[in-house]
Amino acid sequence: MAKNEKSFEENLNELENIVKDLENGEIKLDDAINKYSEAMKLSKICSEKLKNAEEAINKIVNVDGNMEEFKNIEE
């Protein structure tokens, strides 16, 4: 992870704090717009990290050491 890159949990916590601020309703419009913009960026970052984690989890290692997609038998 790069030095400036926050963890998923840090980004999610920051996003939750912004949502609380916005729900509070005691914030100036310009500040609300800036916080909303930041929240959307954090939401995208969290979503991408979750997608990457899901893709990594869905891979399995074959007997020969190669990675392949996990195929659910029930599908």
Image (cartoon, rainbow, N blue to C red):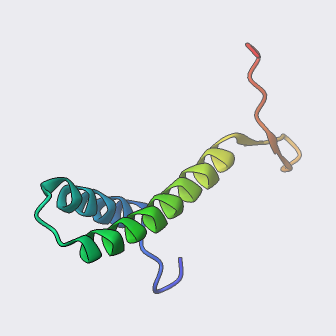
Left or right of 63: which side holds 38? left
Up-down: is 17 above or below 53? below
Q: Position of residue 12 (x, y in %)?
A: 35, 59
Left or right of 3: which side holds 54? right
Left or right of 20: which side holds 69? right
Name the foreground residue: 17 vs 54.
17
Quarter containing the C terminus = top right
Residue with the most extreme bottom position = 3
Name the foreground residue: 68 vs 16.
16
Q: Residue at x 19, y 56 (%)?
A: 20
Q: Residue at x 13, y 56 (%)?
A: 24
Residue with the most extreme top position = 74
Q: Position of residue 29 (x, y in %)?
A: 24, 71
Up-down: is 33 above or below 23? below
Q: Residue at x 73, y 13 (%)?
A: 74
Q: Position of residue 19 (x, y in %)?
A: 26, 56
Name the foreground residue: 68 vs 49.
49
Q: Position of residue 30 (x, y in %)?
A: 28, 76
Q: Residue at x 68, y 47 (%)?
A: 55
Name the foreground residue: 75 vs 66.
75
Up-down: is 33 above or below 75? below
Q: Tell me how many marks there are.
A: 0
